[in-house]
Every structure is written in C-alpha cells, then in structure tokens.
Image (spheres, helix red, strand yellow):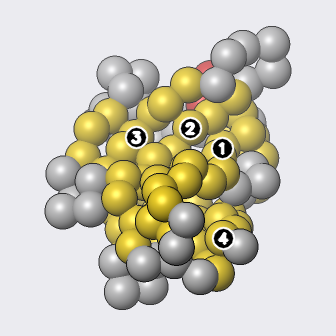
C-alpha cells in the first residue's frame, strides 16, 4: 500500500511565504511524475505545478514565477514553495504521484492540506 501525506498548510498573509511537502511511503519501485493540484471552494481541481523524475518542471500561468516545485528522489518527497501568495491561492492543495508498484504503475493522491491566504 502506498500513501502520500502532505504537510505544511495553514494561514499565510498575502506576500508572505509557505512551503508544502508531500512524502510517499509504502512498497514501491519508483516514482514518475509528481504534481501539485489545488481545489478552491466551488471550483474544479486544477493542476498548478508538475515535476518529472528527471526534474523538469511545468507551471500553471496563475502561479508561474511565484511557486516552485522540487523533489528529493532519495526521500520520495515533493515540495511546493509558495512565495508572494495571493488571496486567490486559497484552496485545498493535493499532491499526486505516478508510482510503480509490484502490480504496475498507479496514481496516488494525498489527503489534501488547506492553504488560506488572508491578512
């Protein structure tokens, strides 16, 4: 069984900074892409940052230049550094990973962590 567990959410002031982390645990051989999604109240879940196994990154226009995704393959973690957050970044943030297990590659999701940007 593979689990993704996020941490680091909370309340942050506009213009501040916050770092989210997500750790994968369980029995698996490797991890392909790792991503961060978010879902605001009344809106669909959206992909905001992605990183490949060889650390190529891609960002949604809404966070480009403000957020940075990174990963530590040795620790099976992915992080999201949020700089200069705005109130519209308020959402539940979920990590996602494509994980290779003994039964094949599967998509896994974290439980989500709330980020609230407010003064």
Which residue is under mark 3? Answer: 49
Secondary element at image label 2: strand
Q: Determine contact: label 4, label 1, CB under 8 Å.
A: no
Q: Earlier in the sequence, mark 2 or mark 3?
A: 2
Residue 118: which quarter of the image? top right
Q: Point out the image quarter for the N terminus.
A: bottom right
Q: Determine contact: label 1, label 3, CB under 8 Å.
A: no
Which residue is under mark 2? Answer: 37
Secondary element at image label 3: strand
Q: Determine contact: label 4, label 3, CB under 8 Å.
A: no
Which residue is under mark 1? Answer: 93
Q: CA distance from mark 2 to mark 3?
A: 7 Å
For residue 2, which numbered disc appears in the image? 4
The answer to whether one can see residue 87 in this image is: no
Residue 7: which quarter of the image? bottom right
Horizontal and vertical percent for residue 104? 49, 60
Left or right for 24, reference 1: left
């Amino acid at each position: 069984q593979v689990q993704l567990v996020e941490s680091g959410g909370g309340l942050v002031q506009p213009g501040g900074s916050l770092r989210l982390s997500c750790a994968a645990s369980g029995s698996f051989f490797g991890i392909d892409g790792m991503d961060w999604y978010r879902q605001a109240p009344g809106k669909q879940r959206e992909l905001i940052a992605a990183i490949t196994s060889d650390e190529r990154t891609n960002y949604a226009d809404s966070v480009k230049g403000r957020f940075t995704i990174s990963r530590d393959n040795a620790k099976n973690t992915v992080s999201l550094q949020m700089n200069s957050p705005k109130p519209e970044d308020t959402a539940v943030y979920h990590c996602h990973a494509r994980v290779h297990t003994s039964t094949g590659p599967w998509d896994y999701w974290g439980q989500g962590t709330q980020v609230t940007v407010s003064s």
